[in-house]
Amino acid sequence: MPTPFALEFVADANYWFGRNCRETTKNSGPCVDEILHRFDGNSASTEAWCSKFVWVCADRAAKRVGVPNPLPQTASTVAMKSGAAAKGLTVDTTPAFGSVFFYSRGKGLGHVGIIVGFEGKDAITIEGNTSLTGGGEGVGRRRRSLADIRAGKNGFRIIHTEQIGGTAQSLLVAGVNPLIALAIAGAAGYMIYEHLS
C-alpha cells in the first residue's frame, strides 16, 4: 500500500489538475501564479515551471503528513533529479505510484511530473507546464509509456518519493484525508484518484 506521503502527493497533484490550471500568457495565469508564489513567493517567473509544480505538491503533502519535503527546491529538472539522489532518494527506472518521473530534453534540460497511477502499458501522470488538450500549457494529465520509462529512453528516471512518510498503517494517524484512506482500502490507486479529481 502507498505511504501517507505518496497518497497526499498524488492527492495534491489531483487538486491542481481539478482546478484546470492553465497559462493565460507564457508561464503565467491565475492558478499558475499561485503555484509559482507557493514555490518561492514570486509569481512573476519567466522560466519553465514543471519542477516548481512538483516541488509545491511535495511540500504541501510533506506538511500534511509531518515530514520534510524530500525534494530539493529548484526550478531545474536536472538539479531536482541529482539533488534528490544526493538527499538519499533512490533514482532508477522502476515506476511507482507517488513517484516523480524525469526525462531529458537534451542540452541540460528536462521535464518532471508525478506518477498518479497505471493503466495498461502506461503510467498516468500529472504534470505542470505541459501541453494541454485543446492547446496551451498548464497542469495536465498525461500517459507515459512504461516500456520507455523502464528502458530509460530519453533519459527517463524515477525519483522514489513514494518511499517517504511511513507506512500505510499510519494513514489516519498521519492525518491523511479519511476519504482517501477509505478509498485506498478498497481500490487501486489510479481509479481512486480518477474519481477524486
Image (cartoon, helix red, strand yellow):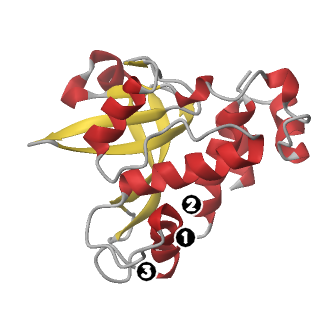
* Residue 100 position (above or below residue 168): below
Q: Amino acid at mark 1?
A: Asn
Q: Where is mark 2, residue-wise?
A: 17
Task: Tell me the CA gap for discs 3 and 2.
Answer: 14 Å
- Is 87 or 9 nearer to us in this picture? 87
Q: Where is mark 1, residue-wise?
A: 20
* Residue 88 position (above or below residue 137): above
Q: Position of residue 182 (x, y in %)?
A: 90, 37
Q: Amino acid at mark 3?
A: Gly
* Residue 195 position (above or below residue 169): below
The answer to whether residue 68 is visible is yes
Q: Position of residue 23 (x, y in %)?
A: 39, 76
Q: Earlier in the sequence, mark 1 or mark 3?
A: 1
Which of label 3 and label 2 is nearer to you?
A: 3
**Mark 1 and 3 residues: CB-CB less than 8 Å, in contact?**
no
The answer to whether residue 119 is visible is no
- Is 153 or 73 nearer to us in this picture? 73
* Residue 94 position (above or below residue 47): above
Q: Position of residue 39 (x, y in %)?
A: 48, 62
Under circle 2, the secondary element is helix
Identity of the residue drawn at 43% across and 80% down: 29
